């Protein structure tokens, strides 16, 4: 494990990604303490450009709200949605994949057809439909994102389990009388973890993008300040106040980039034989 | 941001421009391109009276009267009219050389047919006024006499083209009105004739050479261009493809950019008859808004000045109560409902409100309304309310408002020039009924005011009506059954060399009769 961490940090891209992510996390955790006022407060004249008024480093938006405060509070929403929806997707996808891979046969067929059913619908379209049916609130946004992002997890886990279940140590566990549940959770899944971790880190990035896209379209929670919402409202004034879309756009770009770099670094670190360096 | 507080100057300029005496001599000729948004479902004004239909069909059809920006009646198909002393008999004398677009003569028979037969069947809003009418008669070819059962104050205000368009009897008599083939090629008496409609693209009208006013209209051709996307409509104006952007055809946030262009004029006149009036419904049936102190706290929390400036580009006015200042019998001398956070907090402290979450429904008509709801929520939170925005689409909004499933909900409605036609309907008890979002949704009940509305509608004397309506406005404003917001200003944007475009209280809807292009 230490070996892996070393490999991870020696990867320049991963180190940068981790650094950016730490900043975002710090912003999300500490920022709202500094910007304790609601990001919806109208504090100054609308459309102040960045760096023109003290105390408003990034200026104000169409209603005179502090863009910096929005950015800081948005970080929390983006990370929250990214992490929680990924966890929920894992909770759905891992058991389904594990059961399909381990039992095979009819169970596999049934579960995989079910998974494919979700995979055949474009995920963004499905998320929009789900939010149109439910009340757009943070809870349903997270749920919708989780519902559209679990199928790849299930397929990945199934593949891993399929290749692991015929290993000797699994047979040994079977012979020693361990229950099926114990075999899957204690013997197989821990060994299937590395690719799942890599996938999960990329899923966080996708979830953040998805949330931003939904908010951009006005399908996010109208009571929550998020980066996608900020871009969505600024889109209409892009010709007169481009920075209002640009700033949260950069925030999304950096966060998603960081998650991707980390995912790649993790991949290299956890699967040393596949890493690009040894190739 | 654009000009601050230029509203009054803008009004003054527009007013000056609208007076023919100030303008140069009109020049004939030219083609005018306008935006029509959205594309109308039909051009048969007797059957369909929605906004886009009237905008195009207002050039094709006419009524007996027109109304200037002060809503004073002007001659149209009727050259003179006379109201009897007792307010029961209205006699109209028609122009005698008016022809339908197909060459037939327009006579008093057409008027009787239009009102008594056609529109009585097809036009609910007119039908509500016609219950006061005893008979409609045509003693000779150029005279029409309306006899009322009892005096009806707003009667002289219902002879507008969208309320009472004249329908050709020789085409429609005895037919199935809704399925008559001629609905696709409308025949009216107006200054322009229908030429062609390419669906999804444009509607083409041409000059009526036989129009009964010598020399009018001045324009040769009129094209209403259909452009489905808001940004593209702005671009169509910028590139010169269209010359006129009627109110509401581009998004508010594009207005400052477009009006800053060269040779571009803007006016918010031409909506006086409709008097679009916005407010927030407050649920008087149940929940926190049943307490008058809570309602007052809401009312005084709202920074409407800010909304006017930041969201509506200073076009429009602060509402002072239920009646729009452009509607007849407006009285601004009512209790103040201005922005006063301290007063709001006091009222809130005196109220029963104990921290429940207030559900606020924005109007799902686009960005401006969404931002407005966000600003309002913030205003209310700063007073001490806990407010949650409820996101809906248009169908969801209709459903929730109609079923009284809200605490606060944005809306706006037209007033049609007279409190009896467009204001009382949202405040009288008899108009409380679940299912419609356009009646007395708030659930305001005040028998004293109900009686005054009743009395004012059937009074024949304007002085008496003014007194009653002033009384009503005073009482209602003090009860704050709803939170009045703005008299909405819908800017008409046009090239400055298009003259006399907006000359009446319904603006472009019947304005092309007088419009001309300076070469």
Image (cartoon, coloured by chain):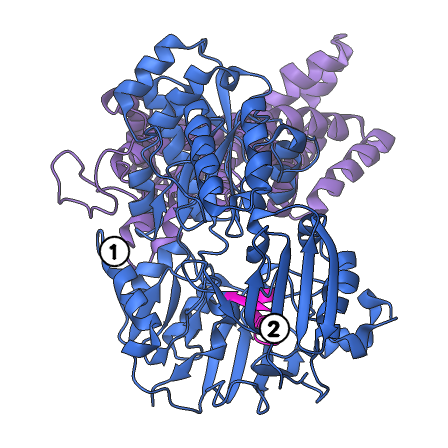
Which residue is painted at 49% across and 86% down in the image? B216
Residue under label 1, please give it: B8
Residue B482 seen by the camera = yes
Of the chain colours in the picture, the one used for chain B is blue
Front residue of this view, candidates B100 and A220? B100
Q: Along the polypeptide, which appears first: circle 2 or circle 1?
A: 1
Q: Secondary structure at mark 1?
A: helix
Q: Nearer the viewer, residue B202 or A191?
A: B202
B121 vs A201, left or right, is right
Number of the front mark, 2 or 1: 2
In the displayed structure image, the side of residue A177 where residue B175 appears, left or right: right
Q: Chain of mark 2?
A: B
Residue B19, numbered circle: none
**Is B249 left or right of B92, judged from the image as shown?**
left
Tell me if A254 is positioned left or right of A213 in this view.
left
Specify start and end residues of the magenta stretch as a single range. Answer: B53-66
Is B54 colored magenta in this rendering? yes
**Residue A267 in picture, x, y percent from top left:** 47, 37
Chain A: colour as depicted: purple
Picture quarter containing residue B260?
bottom left
Examine the rendered structure and indicate whether residue B30 appears above or below residue A175: below
Pinpoint the chain carrying mark 1. B
Residue at 23% x, 60% y: name it.
Answer: B9
Q: Position of residue B97 (x, y in %)?
A: 62, 86
**In which quadrant is the N terminus of chain A drawn?**
top left
Numbered circles on residues, count: 2
Check residue B486 for magenta coloring: no
């Amino acid at each position: 494990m230490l070996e892996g961490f070393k490999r991870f940090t020696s990867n320049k891209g991963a180190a940068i990604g981790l650094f950016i992510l730490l900043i975002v996390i710090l912003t999300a955790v500490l920022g709202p303490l500094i910007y304790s006022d609601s990001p919806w407060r109208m504090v100054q004249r609308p459309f102040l450009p960045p760096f023109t008024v003290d105390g408003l480093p990034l200026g104000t938006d169409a209603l005179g709200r502090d863009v910096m405060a929005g950015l800081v509070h948005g970080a929390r929403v983006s990370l929250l949605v990214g992490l929680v929806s990924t966890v929920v997707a894992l909770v759905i996808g891992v058991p389904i994949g594990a059961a399909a891979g381990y039992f095979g046969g009819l169970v596999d067929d049934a579960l995989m057809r079910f998974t494919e059913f979700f995979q055949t619908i474009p995920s963004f379209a499905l998320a929009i439909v789900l939010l149109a049916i439910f009340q757009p609130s943070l809870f349903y946004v997270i749920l919708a994102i989780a519902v559209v992002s679990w199928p790849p997890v299930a397929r990945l886990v199934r593949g891993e389990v399929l290749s692991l279940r015929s290993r000797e140590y699994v047979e040994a566990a079977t012979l020693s009388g361990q229950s099926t549940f114990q075999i899957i959770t204690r013997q197989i899944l821990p060994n299937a973890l590395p690719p799942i971790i890599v996938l999960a880190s990329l899923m966080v990035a996708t979830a953040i993008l998805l949330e931003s896209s939904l908010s951009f379209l006005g399908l996010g929670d109208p009571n929550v300040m998020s980066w996608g919402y900020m871009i969505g409202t600024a889109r209409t004034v892009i010709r007169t106040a481009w920075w209002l879309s640009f700033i949260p756009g950069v925030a999304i770009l950096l966060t998603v980039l960081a998650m991707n770099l980390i995912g790649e670094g993790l991949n290299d670190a956890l699967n040393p034989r596949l890493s690009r360096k040894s190739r | 941001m654009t000009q601050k507080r230029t509203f009054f100057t803008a009004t003054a300029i527009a007013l000056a421009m609208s007076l023919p005496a100030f303008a140069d001599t009109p020049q004939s000729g030219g083609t005018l391109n306008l935006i029509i948004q959205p594309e109308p479902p039909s051009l048969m004004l007797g059957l369909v009276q929605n906004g886009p239909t009237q905008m195009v069909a207002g050039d094709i059809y006419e009524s007996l009267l027109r109304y200037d920006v002060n809503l004073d009646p002007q001659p149209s198909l009727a050259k003179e009219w006379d109201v009897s002393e007792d307010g029961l008999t209205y006699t109209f004398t028609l122009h005698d050389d008016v022809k339908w677009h197909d060459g037939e003569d327009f006579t008093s028979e057409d008027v009787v047919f239009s009102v008594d037969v056609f529109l009585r069947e097809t036009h609910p809003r007119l039908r509500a006024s016609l219950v006061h009418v005893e008979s409609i008669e045509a003693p000779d070819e150029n005279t029409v006499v309306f006899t009322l059962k009892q005096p009806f104050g707003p009667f002289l205000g219902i002879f507008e083209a969208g309320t009472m368009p004249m329908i050709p009897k020789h085409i429609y008599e005895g037919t199935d009105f809704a399925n008559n083939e001629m609905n696709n090629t409308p025949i009216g008496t107006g200054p322009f004739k229908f030429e062609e409609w390419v669906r999804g693209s444009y509607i083409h009208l041409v000059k009526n050479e036989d129009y009964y006013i010598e020399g009018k209209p001045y324009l040769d051709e009129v094209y209403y261009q259909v452009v489905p996307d808001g940004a593209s409509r702005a671009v169509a104006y910028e590139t010169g493809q269209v010359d006129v952007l009627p109110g509401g055809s581009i998004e508010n946030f594009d207005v400052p950019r477009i009006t800053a262009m060269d040779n571009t004029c803007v006016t918010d006149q031409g909506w006086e008859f409709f008097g679009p009036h916005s407010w927030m419904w407050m649920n008087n049936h149940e929940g926190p808004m049943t307490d008058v102190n809570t309602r007052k706290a809401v009312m005084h929390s709202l920074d409407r000045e800010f909304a006017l400036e930041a969201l509506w580009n200073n076009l429009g006015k602060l509402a002072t109560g239920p009646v729009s200042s452009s509607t007849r019998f407006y009285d601004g001398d009512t209790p103040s409902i201005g922005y006063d956070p301290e007063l709001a907090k006091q009222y809130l402290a005196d109220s029963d409100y104990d921290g429940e979450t207030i559900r606020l429904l924005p109007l799902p008509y686009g960005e401006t309304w969404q931002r407005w709801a966000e600003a309002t929520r913030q205003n209310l939170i700063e007073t001490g309310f806990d407010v949650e925005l409820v996101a809906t689409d248009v169908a969801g909004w209709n459903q929730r408002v109609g079923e009284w499933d809200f605490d606060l909900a944005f809306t706006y409605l037209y007033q049609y020039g007279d409190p009896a036609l467009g204001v009382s309907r949202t405040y009288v008890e008899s108009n409380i009924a679940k299912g419609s979002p356009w009646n007395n949704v708030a659930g305001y009940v005040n028998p004293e005011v109900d009686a005054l509305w009743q009395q004012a509608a059937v009074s024949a004397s304007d002085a008496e009506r003014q007194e009653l309506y002033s009384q009503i406005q005073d009482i209602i404003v003090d009860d704050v059954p709803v939170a009045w917001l703005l008299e909405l200003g819908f800017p008409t944007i046009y090239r400055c060399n298009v003259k006399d475009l907006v000359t009446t209280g319904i603006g472009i809807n019947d304005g092309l009769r007088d419009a001309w292009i300076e070469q």
